[in-house]
Image: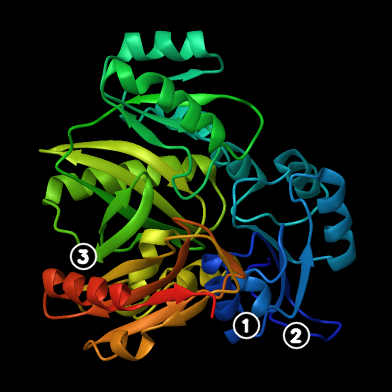
Amino acid sequence: MSDETRLGTPLAPNATTLLLLGSGELGKEVLIQAQRLGVETVAADRYENAPAMQVAHRAHTLDMTDATAVRDLVAREEPDLIVPEIEAIATAELQRLETEGYTVVPTAEATRLTMDRESIREFAAEDVGVPTTEYAFADSRAAYRAAIDDIGLPVVVKPTMSSSGKGQSVVRTDSDVDAGWEAAREGSRSDTGRVIVEELVDFDYEVTLMTVRHQDGTAFCPPIGHDQVDGDYRESWQPHPMDEQALADAQRMAREVTDGLGGRGIFGVEFFVRGDEVVFSELSPRPHDTGLVTMRTQPADEFELHVRAILGLPIPEITATRPGASAAIVADEPMDAPAYRGAETALSVPETELRLFGKPDAYAGRRMGVAVATADDVETARDRATSAASSVSLDES
């Protein structure tokens, strides 16, 4: 984009076109915000009728790890912006496209580094030098066993590439070791066979610091606390209280890592905090599931901030004007074309909104919607969000 942003007319020859690679619920909100600014939107994913496809001007179904398929799509659409929204993408092809003049958000290199836990952990710990948990990588059962022996139980085991906590487990005893290896291999989004073994941190809390790189510098959302189940987000709340020094350390580390990655847009940077020690955990170069809470708490939510930043538009002062929380609506079992029941009960909870994602099918543990609530304090907001979320059920009728 030039220093002066030009926004064309959708479906006209002068359109400003955004190609989204990965069309889940977070991408859907990105496209809605982009369309509010007159951007023509194209959604792509590996399955049909993904959430963002339902609001895009055009949609394509393809294997995004197939370099030829990605190149053919880009040649067909000629987008002004290529916005990866998932990890499983042909990143080497994105790098080639970037050298040919296409804009990849935040950058093709950042997308490559963050597509798997091995690259981003090594980048953060070794290239940037921020504190992280002790970790090791393994591509065989023997190397995995050696990593556990070196770090010491308990440990967290994850595939190097996965999403929504798939394949993650905590190995606490020798009897859990084999199950942890099998779970990580089965939950991987790639065929590398590599897993990360990391120290299980006895932390006081974990937070996401939504970090916005934009034309005038770097800005931060108030910290977001969250709970996970097997590595997958279930609840988040904002603001999460942090002492002044811990927050300053988290912001400094987030700035250092995102400056190293470069580009514009929002990054979800996760930290463990124990006492006054802040430890880097993970990073996503895009809107974050824990940031769904910002749809109620902030005048400009994470999706608006992302779109503004990548278009080169000013970023407003970022504040949480009212405490809030979010709670995920999760499927208990597989089903096709699920229907939602209980929305009237959920929406009777004060200061509460629902986002039902409209995914074409469900499986046990799949996130299908979210309830977002505000209140005078975070605890009341959490109670409201979880009450609303638990009121919603899914069936195939």
At a point 79% along the width and 57% down the height, the residue shown is 62
Judge from the rendering whether residue 58 lies leftward or rightward of residue 115; answer left or right.
right
Q: Look at label 1 and name its amino acid.
A: Gln
Left or right of 120? Residue 39 is right
Left/right placement of residue 384 relative to residue 5 reads left
Question: Could you tell me residue 247's position as x and y percent?
Answer: 20, 50
Residue 117 place in picture, x, y as percent: 50, 34
Q: Is residue 289 above or below residue 340?
A: above
Q: Amino acid at mark 2?
A: Pro
Which of the marked residues, 2 or 1, is nearer the chain's N terminus? 2
Q: Which disc number belongs to residue 103?
A: none
Badge 1 marks a residue whose secondary structure is: helix
Quarter occupied by residue 148: top left
Distance CA(mark 1)–CA(mark 3): 29 Å
Q: Is residue 23 visible?
A: yes
In the figure, 356 relative to 24: above or below? below
Q: Quadrant of residue 393?
A: bottom left
**Image position of 275 with respect to 102: above or below:** above
**CA distance separating discs 2 and 3:** 37 Å
Going by the numbered disc 3, the residue's amino acid type is: Pro
Residue marked by disc 2: 10
The residue that mark 1 highlights is: 35
Q: Secondary structure at mark 2?
A: loop
Tell me the distance, in whole angstroms, between the alpha carbons under discs 2 and 1.
8 Å
Residue topped by disc 3: 239
